[in-house]
Image (cartoon, grey):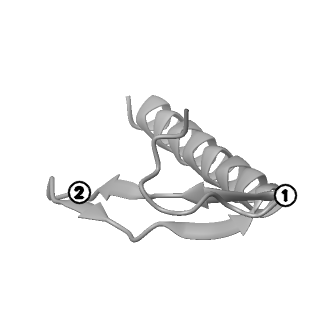
């Protein structure tokens, strides 16, 4: 059974709730949003790519500094 207390998303859409922790340790909760499934997939893929790129850049700069 769905655990969302509100309506279910339309066909081809998902309900997404975003929670982030910033560099100061503060947690930010964003209101749920109904978005197309493909848009969510693209956004998550972009976040992963950016995260990987940042990790690689940090590792490379640490290697060059050492």
Which of 8/21 is in front?
8
Q: Which residue does the image show at 75% across and 51% down from the upper left?
A: 41
* Residue 54 against residue 11 in the figure, above or below: above
Which of 58/43 is in front?
43
Q: Which residue does the image show at 47% across and 29% down from the upper left?
A: 63
Disc 2 on helix, strand or loop? loop
Q: Where residue 43 sits: x, y (%)? A: 69, 59
Judging by the rendered image, the residue that carries numbered circle 2 is 23
Q: Earlier in the sequence, mark 2 or mark 1?
A: 1
Q: Where residue 27 sits: x, y (%)? A: 21, 57
- Which label is found at residue 12? 1
Is 40 left, or right, of 38 in this rendering? left
Q: Please state, as top left, top right, bottom left or bottom right, where the N terminus lies in the image.
A: top right
Disc 1 on helix, strand or loop? loop
Q: Please state, as top left, top right, bottom left or bottom right, where the C terminus lies in the image.
A: top left
Q: Which residue does the image show at 47% across and 50% down from the upper left?
A: 4
Q: Callout 2 environment at 10 Å: few (<14), some (14 to 19), or many (20+)?
A: few
Is 34 left, or right, of 28 in this rendering? right
The image quarter containing residue 14 is bottom right
Q: How many marks?
A: 2
> Nearer the observer, disc 2 or disc 1?
1
Q: Where residue 50 sits: x, y (%)? A: 62, 52
* Residue 20 against residue 31 in the figure, above or below: above
């Amino acid at each position: 059974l769905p655990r969302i207390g509100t309506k279910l998303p339309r066909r081809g859409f998902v309900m997404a709730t975003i929670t982030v922790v910033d560099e100061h340790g503060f947690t930010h909760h964003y209101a749920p949003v109904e978005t197309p499934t493909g848009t969510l997939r693209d956004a998550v893929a972009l976040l992963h790519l950016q995260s990987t790129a940042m990790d690689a850049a940090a590792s490379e700069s640490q290697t060059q500094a050492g």
